[in-house]
Image (cartoon, rainbow, N blue to C red):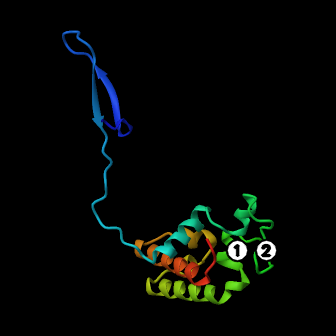
Amino acid sequence: MVDCTSAILSTRSVPDDKTDEIILHHNRPKVPTGTYKSVSFKAAETKYIRLVSGHNKLHSRMHRLKLKESPDCDCGTGIQTEEHILLSCPTHTAHREIMFDNIERMFQRENTPFNARSITFNSALYPQGKTALKLQMKKEVMMYLQRIGVNM
């Protein structure tokens, strides 16, 4: 039996006007041959991807989906959003300071100019600049998410 889900059917006339025959053109996906280099643990990468995509289990999203009564964070200072968890939740201040210190050391190692050293929500999730710097910044955010233990 032929699997037609991965094939495109097309018809072609035979030169002597006999019946049309069906020709299968198989479209095979290009599979990467290199290895995927992970910058962190799978659990940390999963949390990072969920944070970036917005498909997470934070209170704000669960409230939007009518699965939680309140969008408020357990700390009581605001709504539990991605930005709140990453930059302002007082429950995670100690872990956030570790992340900021590691990022600052990374900026110093790479001789990043002072005007380019600001850490905002967008710059933490979508780092710009050198590839090594971007990977290291993502790794620091992933490790922070792993350390705080928030269910994502």
Residue 84 marker: 1
Q: Earlier in the sequence, mark 2 or mark 1?
A: 2
Residue extending furthest front? 1
The C terminus appears in which quarter of the rendering?
bottom right
Residue extending furthest top? 17
Name the amino acid, label 2.
Gly
Kindly indicate the quadrant of the structure image that contains residue 82: bottom right
- Find residue 47 and report its horizontal and vertical position in percent: 55, 71
The N terminus appears in which quarter of the rendering?
top left
Q: Is residue 57 left or right of residue 12?
A: right
Are dots 2 and 1 in contact, CB under 8 Å? yes
> Which residue lies at the image location 19% right of the left edge and 13% below the top edge?
15
Q: Is residue 140 above or below residue 130?
A: below
- Element carrying mark 2: loop
- Element carrying mark 1: helix
**Between 23 and 89, the one nearer to me in the picture:** 23
- Find residue 151 and report its horizontal and vertical position in percent: 63, 74
Crowd around label 1: few <14 · some 14–19 · many ≥20 (10 Å): some
Name the amino acid, label 1.
His
Residue 78 marker: 2
> Which residue lies at the image location 62% right of the left edge and 62% below the top edge?
54
Q: Is residue 11 left or right of residue 110?
A: left
Spatial separation of the CA atoms under disc 2 and disc 1: 8 Å
- Find residue 64 and report its horizontal and vertical position in percent: 74, 59
Whether residue 129 is visible, yes or no, is yes
